[in-house]
Amino acid sequence: MDPQDIDRLVAAAEAAADVAGAVVRPFFRAGLGAELKDDRSPVTIADRSAEQAMRAVLAERFPDHGIIGEEFGADRPQARLRWVLDPIDGTRAFITGRPTFGTLIGLLEGDTPILGVIDQPVTGERWIGAPGRPTTFRSQLGGRAGCRPCPTLAQAELSCTSPEMLAGQEPRWRRLAAAVRRNYWGGDCYAYGLLAIGQIDIVAECDMKLWDWAALVPVIEGAGGRVTDWQGKPLHPGSDGSVLAVGDPALLAPALALLNQPSVASA
């Protein structure tokens, strides 16, 4: 993929993030109600309207590309290049007025995530990971992308959105949590953005759908980190939903060892 093609893809992803932000911002802290989907997760008019706006932008610029969205399913799912959209990752945070949600825009080539945008439309922060390029970060507060060195788990800050996301794997996660300096709950996609600017070191979660992680992989890996499932395998659309992201690649092996340590049988 030549630099001009990448520029066009990045420009389209940013345009989609811009229109999503324009839709989402007026609803933030506006007393918005939410419905429950079949999986008991909340959804709002902001989620649906933002996804429709993003789909329109991307379909106009790349009519032969596929689009997979959390709210409206798949268009042209057999296309080689498929956009993956999560209009509001962290709807629970959004409807309770916490600015730790974000808009996620990923691009798959085949089953491999090659481009990703994490956009926080309220704070104005945006992360962009693109093929063959270092991740970029824009913020009114300044700062730059880049995971920080953290060679041992004992020095690491660990994040997970909620215990419910561990989907019955909490004992495995607790082994990892016991080995780090501190662990935090909350964050959704924003935690992965913080990892990509060197504020935290590990995120370990389960029950992640394609639209939850597709944008994260290029952002984190372009910032020097690694993203796998809990077996250490690359993420793909058929993955089991587990995600392990580390800022310093040296943390990957010891984190995987703890997550996969055999349980001690009771006497």
Image: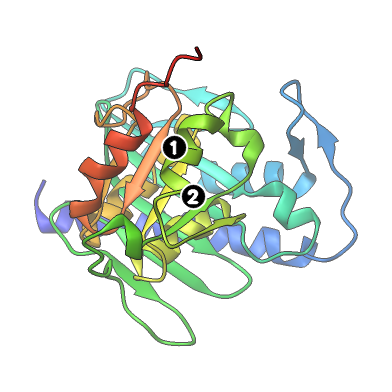
Left or right of residue 132, residue 185 in this image:
right
Residue 49: numbered disc: none
Image point (62%, 62%), residue name: 100
The numbered dot on residue 84 is: 1
Give the quadrant of residue 42.
top right
Residue at position x 39%, y 51% from top?
A: 179
Q: Is residue 62 above or below residue 158?
A: above
The residue nearer to you, when weighing 257 against 8, is: 257
Residue 108 in sight in this render: no
Please name the amino acid that badge 1 sits on.
Val
As helix, strand or loop, the secondary structure at mark 2 comes to strand
Residue under pointer 2 = 104
**Do the residues under discs 2 and 1 have CB atoms within 8 angstroms?**
yes
Estimate the x, y position of residue 135 in percent, counting from the top left: 26, 64
Q: Position of residue 40 (x, y in %)?
A: 77, 27
Nearer the observer, 222 or 21 = 222
Is the residue 264 above or below the residue 226 in the image? Answer: above
Q: Secondary structure at mark 1?
A: strand
Residue 169 point in image, percent of width and height: 52, 27
Residue at screen point 39% across, 46% down? 215
The mark that comes first in sequence, 2 or 1, is 1
241 sits to left or right of 27: left
The residue at the far left in this view is 2
Q: Residue 114, position in %: x, y? A: 25, 43
Tell me: 247 left or right of 121: left
Is 188 placed left or right of 260 in the picture? right
Q: Quadrant of residue 94?
A: bottom right
Query: What colour scheme does the image use?
Result: rainbow
Mark 1 Cα shell of 10 Å, populated few (<14), some (14-19), many (≥20): many
